[in-house]
Image (cartoon, helix red, strand yellow):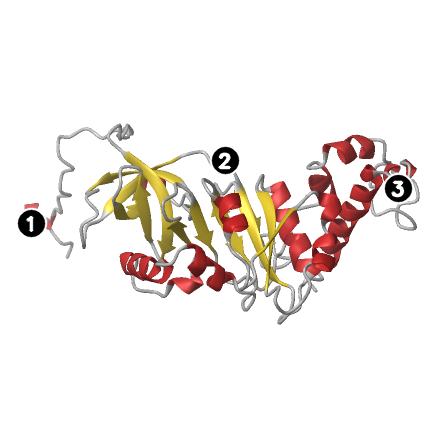
Amino acid sequence: MARRYDESDVRVRPGKGSRPRTKDRPTHDDAKFGMVITKDRGRWGVALDDGPVVVAMRAREMGRTPVEVGDRVGVVGDTSGKKDTLSRIVKLEERTSVLRRTADDTDPYERIVVANADQMLIVTAVADPPPRAGFVERALIAAFVGNVHPILCLTKTDLADAAPFAATFADLDVTVVEAGVDDTLDAVSGLISGHVTAFIGHSGVGKSTLVNRLVPDAFRDTGEVSAVGKGRHTSTQSVALRLPDDDGWIIDTPGIRSFGLAHVDADTVLDVFSDLDAIVEQCPRGCTHAGPPADPECALDKMEEGTSTARRRDAVRALLTALRSNDEY
């Protein structure tokens, strides 16, 4: 027998209310701006321009927009900076520079190390551990293509003479500074004052010691910022530290084991050097600019030997060799 239905069998969907839907988004004209100084599992520490450090989450309308240490962001909500308060990141300003790397040269995924740094301090020991020219060359490539001014900082100069290693990069016009335990830090301080400087280097080269000498309360500040996140020790994360009595910042990055450059090719590197870039326009298609025997018709080999430009060509070719070989030693 067929079932007979009545009104009790009818399921009525709840109404969605009378409020019309809209795709309009708030303008957040009241957003306060500052710099991201920590990033930790869905929480960002933001040092606002007017003083306090706030904890923020990424607003829904931001989607999956990446927000990195060094970014300039606009936040709304509770911006008092008081304990257990949370604001929202609603705006991301255009970046002036991006320092990127990949896990290795076969990994297409680019990782942003630091945003908006105008300088990169490559911290390298001249002994114990011995300096790794390949790592420095790769870091220089990342800086050049990322629109970041590189500075080579040599530590442990009490153990070995820094001059021979520094001379390796003389023809690239790289600023070199020494920061051994017996050296004053006047030269380093003078270079980073008023700048946002990313510090990178392998573990054991003295980078943390250098940071602590420049920012004596770095451990205390880092601990406080770590609490802003979810308690993870910040040695595994980049953290921005304000220089004492200065408007400059250090962005201390965790020890980097390798500097993958899958996102960089030879032409990208040569674009940075205007004098060489003009010359390689005469190269045949497909030229890798490595010179003979690989590229017997490379235009870079037609310049007069012994000139400053020829010496820079040789130095840049060393960078290209490091780019192709992934040899960081």
Q: Residues within 10 Å of mark 2 (few under 14, many from 20)?
A: some
Tally of marks: 3
Q: Quadrant of the C terminus?
A: bottom right
What is the C-alpha distance between the residues marked 3 and 1? 96 Å
**Is disc 3 in contact with disc 1, using a CB cutoff of under 8 Å?**
no
Q: Residues within 10 Å of mark 3 (few under 14, many from 20)?
A: few
Q: Nearer the viewer, residue 142 or 66?
A: 142
Can residue 112 be spotted in the picture? no
Mark 2 or mark 3: name the one nearer the start of the chain.
Answer: 2
Q: Secondary structure at mark 1?
A: helix
- Residue with the mark numbered 1: 8
Q: Quadrant of the N terminus?
A: bottom left
Which of discs 2 and 3 lies nearer the camera? The answer is 3
Left or right of residue 50, residue 300 in this image? right
Residue 326 in the image: above or below residue 33: below
Mark 3 or mark 1: name the one nearer the start of the chain.
Answer: 1
Q: Amino acid at mark 3?
A: Gly
**Is disc 2 in contact with disc 3, using a CB cutoff of under 8 Å?**
no
Residue 306 disc label: 3
Residue 79 disc label: none
Left or right of residue 308, residue 118 in this image? left
Which of discs 3 and 1 lies nearer the camera? The answer is 3
- Residue with the mark numbered 2: 96
Look at 51% across and 50% down and name the residue there: 186
Q: Secondary structure at mark 2?
A: loop
Residue 241 in the image: above or below residue 181: above
Q: Nearer the viewer, residue 209 or 63?
A: 209
Residue 303 lies, in percent from the top left, at 89, 36
